[in-house]
Image (cartoon, helix red, strand yellow):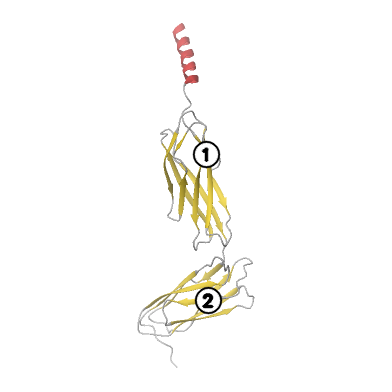
Amino acid sequence: MKTPVSFALFALVFAIVVPAGAALKWETTEVDLHPSLSDKTAVAHFKYKNTGDKPVKITSVHPSCGCTTAALAKDVVGPNESGEITATFNIGDRSGVQTKNITVRTDDETTEATILKLKATIPQLLQVAPTFIFWSANDVLKPKTITVNVGGDFPVTKLNVTSTDKSIATEVEPEPDAKAFRITVTPQEAGRPINAALKIEPDFPKDAPKIFYANVRVDSRAKMPQK
């Protein structure tokens, strides 16, 4: 009858003296950023600490897309040591809410991969609609309009619009409320297919120019208007 009791006491002592192992504890796994209009990148810092009694090796740090990089100062974290992963999101021409994930794996087979989330809310400078205009085979090549609305209180006073095809003429006119522009697009040539990009450049911000695009396509069978 004493054997089960002795075994239970031995198991209890063994559980107490067994090392706790390795464990990374994260200060946070989600960072919410609000970059300014002139910022080219959004940077998040994900801090961690090894709360176990064994070293932890970070075996991989994998961002969800090519627009995000993740830097790691060291891949082996000793007991009670701290560190961080720096994630950099390249904003480019993106706007609105952007969410990027970074998957972190370690040599601890008892734990699953950690998913770090970088969320960036990027100001919307311009809203271009539509971003694609098309003249089909049955169309007459009459002018079509693109509307550009200015977001927030951004002081955009002028748009410069250029086409990659010289046969596409554009004219920019401000709307009466000064918070929108109208771009009139007119093909000047028929008889050939046209695929062009319109580059739309606002005059703000001057220190970090932003470029927006709209696409134009003309079927070769579309006709010029009769005079």
Above or below: residue 200 compared with residue 84: below
x 60%, y 77%: residue: 175
Q: Quadrant of residue 125?
A: bottom right
Q: Position of residue 103 (x, y in %)?
A: 44, 45
Name the kind of residue labelled 2 in the image.
Asn
Above or below: residue 121 compared with residue 81: below
Residue 1: assigned label: none
| Viewer-nearest residue: 136 or 152 | 152
Which element type, helix, strand or loop, lies under badge 1? strand
Q: Quadrant of the N terminus?
A: top left
| Viewer-nearest residue: 31 or 143 | 31
- The crowding category of the residue bearing disc 1, from other C-alpha atoms within 10 Å (few below 14, some 14 to 19, many at least 20), is some
Name the kind of residue labelled 1 in the image.
Tyr
Above or below: residue 50 compared with residue 7: below
Q: Quadrant of the C terminus?
A: bottom left
The answer to whether residue 223 is left or right of residue 154 is left
> Label 1 belongs to which residue?
48
Which element type, helix, strand or loop, lies under badge 2? strand
Circles 2, 1 touching at the beta carbon (< 8 Å) = no
Badge 2 or badge 1: first in the primary sequence: 1
| Viewer-nearest residue: 88 or 15 | 88
Q: Residue furthest top?
A: 1
| Viewer-nearest residue: 110 or 144 | 110
x 53%, y 49%: residue: 44
Q: CA distance from mark 2 to mark 1?
A: 47 Å
Residue 160: assigned label: 2
Does residue 1 appear in the picture of this structure? no
Q: Position of residue 174 (x, y in %)?
A: 59, 78
